[in-house]
Amino acid sequence: MRMMLIGWLVLIAAGTAMAQQSNPLPDAGFEDGAEAWSIHDSVSKVTAEAARSGKVGLRVGQDEYFAGGASVHSAQFAVEPGQTVSMSFWARAKQTNMGVYFMFFDADGRMTGKAINCPVTHKDGQWHQYTKSAEAPAGAKTVDLWVHTYAGAKGIVDLDDFTIGGLGDGVKALPAKQPRARKKQVTEKLDPDQVPRRKTPPIIVLKLDDVKQVGKTVHPRWQRVADYLEKRNIKSGFGVICKTLDGASPEYVQWLKSHHDRGLIEFWFHGWDHGVHEEDGTRYNEFKHRSYDEQMARLARSQKLAKDQLGFAFETFGPPGGVGNGSHDEITLRVMVDDPDLHVMLYPQPMDDAGRAAMASSNGRFVILGRVWAVGLEGAVGVPDFQRFLKGYAANMDRAYFTLQGHPAMWDDARFAQFEKIIDFLVQREAKFMTPTEAAAAVGR
Ligand SMILES: [Zn+2]
């Protein structure tokens, strides 16, 4: 009896000490109503139904398509590069649609390194504990835990009883990352039938990015979108990353040529390699921060391959992106205006002075089609969002044309279904689908 009692006391003492040292995470079980957490989406909530222990837990996700996905951040903690941090949590799910990530931030509070996912893998509707360790990357000053359902994924998950460890003695919790200031999120759904009909339907350019050879032809998701648009007799523009034209398979060449010949798809120039280059620690997109000659060489090499392999030159350019400091500069505009075959640019942003100057310098030969941020196929890259599109469309009723950007290789079934809804709506509204060069001619008039 006495031995047992001593054993108990030791256990309790050890447990208490461990709890204090190994889990500095405030409100780790949400019993304070997620006070120390920051909920960035409009769906996640603390609720009794999500409790594993105590009175409440965290419930994230929804049963329908969730374009942005859940986003909940814990308190932050100071960390050193190379330091190993650990997490644990309990989750209950019926599908595999989410994970909890380590997210690292630099001295300016910007994300640094990759977010490291601890995915929820059980889908039996039972509680399971998950653990993960990770090393803080170079430049890391703080770390947090980020609860995230994948963009576009469906399904509800309950989470409770988080820990974070490896942070050293006496580490103090810092405030959680706050959502960026933005217009109040409108969460109510817009009914498509409530959107008034326009007097003149808009011109639509489907700007679909990143065609390249995969296997012998293209990714099956490109085949799917090409087949779908052909079946509906809808015109579009497919942006080609040209590097795989070098040594292309006969099948890939045939795929491009036959679709080009059928006239529904205009293939346009979307960069040589879509790569990112670095100078003095800053990363730039392919057509940014490079000399005229270097940019021209990338275009010329691509044009030559197109002519040799496909029998036509690209007439339209859309600059490849990747990093967030712009995807072209004024040199790019000169390069594109100077090419004898190119005469259309799908601008990655709303029209600006540089774009207007480029058009003026070409005496009207070169036409730039600007973007409207609010109106696109996708919210986040690769994640079509019908509701977002619809709200943007309804707020821009006087705009003559829209270029709608998408990344079909990233569209799984649920995402493709959102794309179909957008197309259905536009067809119903008698939108005029055009290739980029057709739209440029129409808008130019
Ligand atoms: Zn791209």
Image: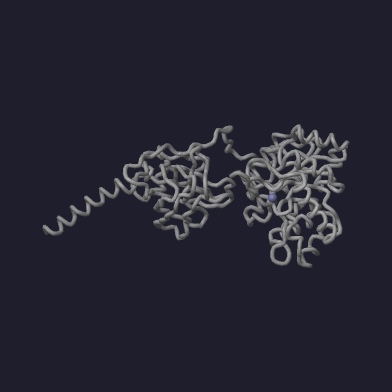
The C terminus sits in image quarter = top right
In the rendered image, residue 380, in percent from the top left (x then y), is placed at 62, 45
Side (left or right) of 184 relative to 147: right
Residue 227 location, x and y as percent? Answer: 76, 59
Residue 212 placement (x, y as % from top left): 72, 58
> In the rendered view, how is the structure colored?
one colour
| Label tally | 0
Say which quadrant the N terminus sits in: bottom left
Where residue 151 sits: x, y (%)? 57, 49
Nearer the observer, 275 or 30: 275
Residue at the far left in the pictured view = 2
In the rendered structure, the answer to whether residue 76 lies left or right of residue 426 reads left
Image quadrant in which you'd find residue 338: top right
Q: Is residue 233 visible?
A: no
For the question of whether residue 92 can be seen, the reply is yes
Camera-side residue: 202 or 325? 325
Which residue is drawn at the image coordinates 82% and 51% (left, top)? Answer: 314
- Horizontally, residue 213 falls left or right of residue 57, namely right
Q: Residue at x 18, y 52 (%)?
A: 9
